Structure formats: structure tokens, C-alpha cells
Amino acid sequence: MHATHLRLNQADSAESAPQNNNLLGLDAVRAWAAVGVVMLHACVPYSDPDVPGLTWATTDTPHMGLTALMWAIEIVIMPIFLVMAGFLAFRSMSSRGPLATLKSRTRRLGWPFFLAVIFLIPVDLYAWLLGWLADGVITPRQMRALKFAEGQDEHLWGLSHLWFLQYLILYIAVLAGAWKWLQRIDPARAFRVGMPLTMLAAVLVLCIHPEVVWGFQHAFLPVPSKWLYSGCAFAMGVLIAHADSNLVWLRQIAGRTCGPSVMLCVATTVLGIWVLRQTSSSDVNQASAFPVVVSPITWTSLALLTVASATGVSLTLIGMACRLVKKIDPITQRLATASFAIYLLHHPILVLFHVAAKHGLPTVSPVFKMALGTTVAVWIPVGMHFVFRGVMARRASKNTSQSGQETPSILPMPMASETLPSERRLAG
């Protein structure tokens, strides 16, 4: 694996990085959003009610505050990443062209995806089964044979958290295919018409399939409803980049939209938890087969609030960061640099922690266990990333000195004096 494959900020090449600090805030957003993903998963064992369709390795003492925190993060976290991904994909295609960007992204995202499927998915699987074994859900024989009771493994098989890479590669391919058509459309008109239509499409998807957000869809191939909903956020980033590639408009309105966006997110979280607490039913004939009985008006209201809060918080956070962040502090810089490692590696680490914490710390507060789990699952991947990077840097330096050439290695690793400029590359 190339060293650069452990860096989400190098999924985009240098040509898509800004030439000034106007967009440096995207690095800060990426860094702390990666922590947000870990925190989201750290809350799962303590949620009540459970996430429909999500099979976790273990469950622990429920906590209402952690349930609310989990859903608040769930509503906004992937839209944040997808808006940034669409924004930067458009910028990259503008500077390099669609074909070059598609080839570069497919290579930089495809190899980590392929290797993670081969090596990380089995680790994830057995981490899950270890939790089931510790809870007495399965026997050692079932764990060895991978044979379970009917329906027991219904939501076990799929790409787990790696779905994001699979979807992102497909979105970039679609954007490359539509590039010439998009360039013929006036940017202002595309934004003015495209943003409402994109939000409307997202609302319609949630009205039919609320489990896209208010549940979990696990599969090896893209789930159409999840792919469409996530694609709406990616499309928003594309439309914003087409109309305002330096985010001048977002920086101007971010201060005014902050309050309303937070209130929308709180209202959505409260309504969503209330909906999930309603009477479940297996015989309700709904288009989404979502096992909750509520009125169509409630579904529609929840869909509208979810899309509005996800859009509002995502755009506000990006705008505020680009407006306020002019220099990245050392901790944020390290998190941003290792964000891809955090994304790839945190899952099995966190699950093993959940199992150990449940059985080893049964009386400890869920809040403390969530905080400790988040810390462990963030900083172990960060440490592994920098150790790996240091090893590759020494190997590259040794190879260069042995060859007596001044040309850089095919696996260039920045020295201390080069770290700051190279690590300002933005997320793909």
C-alpha cells in the first residue's frame, strides 16, 4: 500500500488545493468530522432505542443523552463529508479535467477500498462475532463455522463503514460523465434551480425510505435509496463549487444560519427519537418496510426536518470554518493528516473496546466509556499512521541515498520542514 493511501487529504492531488488560506477551514472540518464519526459509533451500544437494521457487537447500559448525541451526529456527519467531496471533486475537474480526476481518484480511493475489503472486513467480522460470543448470543462452534440461527445474521453481511468509499468513487464517475453537460449550464442558474431540486429529491427519498438516515442499510453493493440520498449531498457540493469556488457566499451567511441550523438539528433529533419509540410492527405494509407505525404527515415532517438540518449544519459548519480558520493548530493538523487512517481503522478498535468495557467495566458510567472509547479509537489509528509514515520516510531516504540520486522517491514522505505545506492538501 502506498503511504499516501493512508491520507484522506491526499485523495485529492495538489492541484485542487487552494493557493491561499481561504479554504484552510476544510482541513479543520475534515479533522473534527472524522472524530465525530468515531464518536457516533462510540455511542451505539448505549442508544435506546436501537438503530433499526444495525447489528452491533454488543449492547450496554442505555443512556438518553448519548442516544440524542448519536442521532444528532448521524443526521449531519455524512452530508458534511459528501458536500466537501463534491466541492473538491468539481475543483479538481476544473483544473485537471474530468478524465484525469477520475483516474486519479479511482486509483487513490480504489486501492485503499480494495485492500480494506480484503483485510479489514474479516477483522471487523470477527470483532463482531467476539462480542456476540462474549454476550452468549452465539457459541464458539457457530463462530468457527459462520453458521447462525435463522435471521441471526440478517444485518451482519456488508461493507460496514467502507460503503462511503464505494459510493464516492461512483459519484466521481457520474460527475465526470456529466461534466460537459454541466459546463454548458450557467453557474448561478444551476445553483438557484439545482439546490432546491436536490433537497426535494433527498426529502422524497426519506419519505419512502426513512431507514436511509433513521436506520442502517448494510450490503455489499450500493443500496439505491442510500446511494441517491448521499448523492444529493455530493451534488450540493458540486453546485456550490460551480457557482462559488472560493465559498465567498457561504462565509458571508454562515454566521446568520448557525442558530437556525442548530435549532433544526435539535428538533429533528427529538422528533426522530420519538418516532423510533413508537409501536413497532412487522405486518405494516410500508414501501420502506420500516418497522415503525406513524402517520404519513409525521414521516414527511421528519424527512423535511432531516434534510433541512443536514443541509443547514453542513453548509454553516463549512462556511464558518473557512471564515474563521486561518491557521491549523498542531492537534487539528495531526487529526486532518491521519483522518483517512481514523476512518479506516477505528471500527474494529472501537468494537473491541466496547466488548472489553462492557464486561470489564460494568459499573462505569456510559458517558465515560463513550469518551474513553472515542479517545482510544481516534489516537490508535493516528499513532499507527505516523509510525507507518515514519517507516516509509526512512525507507525512501535510504533508497535515495543508496541510489545517489536527488530525484524524489515514488513514495514521497515530507520531512519536518515540508510538513506544513504538504499537509494543507484538502480532502477528496
Image: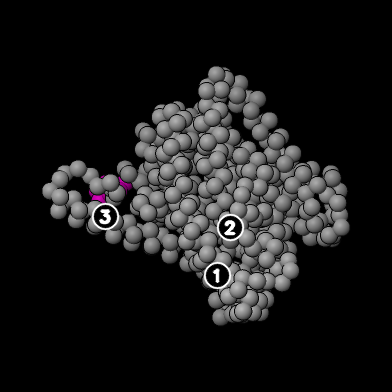
Which is nearer the N-term, disc 3 or disc 1?
1
Q: CA distance from mark 3 to mark 1?
A: 32 Å
Q: Residue at x 84, y 44 (%)?
A: 297
The residue under label 3 is 393
Residue at left offset 71%, top offset 72%: 149
Label 1, label 2: how far apart the Cα atoms are = 12 Å
Q: Secondary structure at mark 2?
A: helix
Report the amino acid beneath label 1.
Ala
Nearest to the eye among marks 3 and 1: give it: 1
Start-end of magenta stretch = 414-420
Q: In the displayed structure, would residue 92 be above or below residue 44?
A: above
Packing grade of label 3 (10 A; few <14, some 14-19, many >=20) is some
- What is the distance, in whole Å, between disc 3 and disc 2 at their CAs? 31 Å
Query: Percent position (x, y) of residue 315?
Result: 57, 39
Name the amino acid type tagged 2: Ser
Q: Which residue is mark 1?
A: 127
- Looking at the image, the residue that sits furthest to the left is 404
Between 416 and 111, the residue placed more toward the observer is 111
Instruction: Give amino acid for label 3.
Output: Ala
